[in-house]
Image: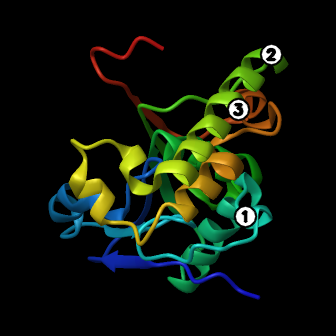
Amino acid sequence: AGVSIHYEVHGNGPAILLSHGYSATARMWDGQIAAFKDRYKVIVWDMRGHGQSAYPKDPAAYSEELTVTDMAAILDACGQKQAVIGGLSLGGYMSLAFHARHADRTRALMLFDTGPGFKKDDAREAWNARARTRGDDLDARGLAALGASDEVRQSKHRDATGLAGAARGMLAQRDDTVIRSLETIAKPTLVLVGANDTN
């Protein structure tokens, strides 16, 4: 059975596919849409378990591989053979994963406050343990687990089940494929991190 994915297309010109961070939605890109839609076709979307996309019950419906497949399907639906692929945090990681599988469809990369994963198994397992804990917290406390100060973010999701599934299946990383793919990047790449980013 197919999974319904919400996406939007704004403007005309060269295509840019922007992927949001974990627990955010396509709405995080509203400022970029306004700034670039006069010159670019800006495509934004909600990942599985986020915003207006489907919230599959099956834990296996959340994975890096399926997220990359969703990104390719969105480009296909928009009639785009290639696009600038960009994202924030989890969206940046998935942009790297997309490039690793679809370098031919990647015109350029834009990576904002993101990391490429972990080469060492113990570091990856520590990250994955935090992702599983995040999923457990969302199961136990619902959208309140996002924090009381983040009512806007809470209101963008139907419930916490999708975010819990995404934490376990998309935030958690299965191997070092993405970080090892960095040396194969031969596309123009913009990397942007915050002044106070310590990682």
Please name the residue that numbered disc 1 is placed on: 66
Q: Residues within 10 Å of mark 3 (few under 14, many from 20)?
A: many
Sequence-first disc among 1 and 2: 1
Please name the residue that numbered disc 2 is placed on: 122
From the viewer's perspective, is residue 72 above or below residue 146?
below
Sequence-first disc among 1 and 3: 1
Marks 2/3 in contact by CB < 8 Å: the verdict is no
Residue at horizontal 40 percent and vertical 55 percent from the top: 143
Q: SS for tag 2?
A: helix
Q: Residues within 10 Å of mark 2 (few under 14, many from 20)?
A: few
Marks 1 and 3, Cα distance to the nearest angstrom?
A: 18 Å
Residue 128's label in the rendered image is 3
Residue 95's label in the rendered image is none
Marks 1 and 2, Cα distance to the nearest angstrom?
A: 25 Å
From the viewer's perspective, is residue 10 above or below residue 142?
below
Residue 66 in the image: x percent, y percent? 72, 64
Residue at horizontal 41 percent and vertical 31 percent from the top: 113
